[in-house]
Image (cartoon, rainbow, N blue to C red):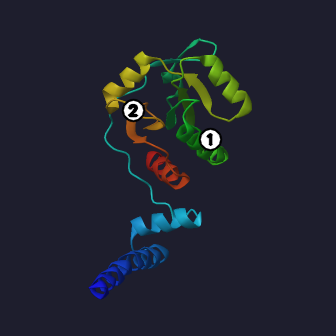
């Protein structure tokens, strides 16, 4: 009776081996984009040539929206219209947000030539953000969001339910794409290239 069970276990054990083999071969040869992404993550490489992600249809505009500096002064987001813009909605208490900021910070030298990056904190206390920024300086423009601002953005893109959330905005100030969760350097490059084309 035990022998048939071992045969079943041996057959079941072959499935992960086949899956790992497929992902490895398809990922390393570039045959399957999903497998390539998995292998790029596992090997810590940027991978194959970056293909731009075409931006979606405009979802609304930021030209009428206002954020605030850490000291409380109003700033019209229209100020940043003229070149593509990435808005990173984040908070100091959010570990994935900090990871996203690190990824963006590593790309500052590359990105800041072609896009503006605004980090929009949804923390309630600007002093927390100020303290965080002293310990973790970056080249991004750091502003504070209000509930009203997030609600207005939500009307255009659907409610912002999680952070980090990145909004990709064209040079005319139109929201063209939204990505929730941590985006890799590769994904960011693809989306930025899409905005620039």
**In the image, what residue occupies the spot 33% across and 78% down?**
12
Tell me if I can see residue 47 in this picture.
no
Determine the CA span between mark 2 and mark 1.
19 Å
Q: Nearer the viewer, residue 15 or 101?
A: 15
> Percent from the top left, x then y, of residue 124?
53, 18
Q: Nearer the viewer, residue 181 or 168?
A: 181
Q: Quick check: 10 above or below 186?
A: below
Q: Is residue 7 left or right of residue 121?
A: left
**In the image, what residue occupies the spot 56% across and 39% down?**
95
Quadrant in which residue 148 is drawn: top left
Q: Is residue 4 left or right of residue 78?
A: left
Q: Quick check: 71 above or below 93?
A: above
Q: Secondary structure at mark 1?
A: loop
Q: Residues within 10 Å of mark 1 (few under 14, many from 20)?
A: few
Q: Is residue 74 left or right of residue 177?
A: right
Q: Nearer the viewer, residue 26 or 30?
A: 26
**In the image, what residue occupies the spot 54% across and 22% down?**
123
For residue 112, the mark is 1
Q: Nearer the viewer, residue 138 or 17?
A: 17
Q: Residues within 10 Å of mark 2 (few under 14, many from 20)?
A: many
> Percent from the top left, x then y, of residue 66?
48, 17
> Percent from the top left, x then y, of residue 162?
42, 34
> Percent from the top left, x then y, of residue 190?
47, 53
Tell me if I can see residue 165 in this picture.
yes
Instruction: Determine which residue is flagged by label 2.
Output: 174
Q: Secondary structure at mark 2?
A: loop
Q: Is residue 93 left or right of residue 25?
A: right
């Amino acid at each position: 009776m035990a022998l048939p069970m071992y045969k079943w276990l041996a057959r079941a054990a072959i499935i992960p081996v086949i899956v790992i083999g497929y992902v490895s071969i398809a990922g390393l040869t570039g045959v399957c984009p999903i497998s390539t992404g998995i292998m790029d993550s596992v090997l810590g490489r940027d991978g194959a040539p970056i293909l731009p992600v075409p931006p979606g249809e405009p979802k609304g505009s930021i030209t009428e929206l206002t954020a605030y500096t850490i000291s409380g002064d109003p700033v019209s987001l229209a100020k940043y219209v003229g070149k593509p813009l990435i808005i990173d909605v984040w908070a100091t208490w959010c570990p994935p947000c900090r990871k996203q900021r690190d990824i963006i910070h590593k790309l500052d030298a590359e990105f800041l030539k072609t896009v503006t990056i605004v980090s929009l904190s949804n923390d309630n206390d600007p002093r927390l953000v100020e303290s965080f920024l002293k310990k973790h300086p970056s080249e991004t423009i750091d502003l504070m969001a209000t509930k009203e601002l997030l609600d207005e953005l939500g009307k255009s893109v659907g409610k912002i339910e999680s952070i980090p959330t990145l909004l990709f905005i064209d040079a005319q100030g139109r929201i063209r794409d939204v990505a929730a969760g941590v985006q890799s350097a590769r994904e960011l490059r693809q989306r930025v290239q899409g905005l620039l084309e």
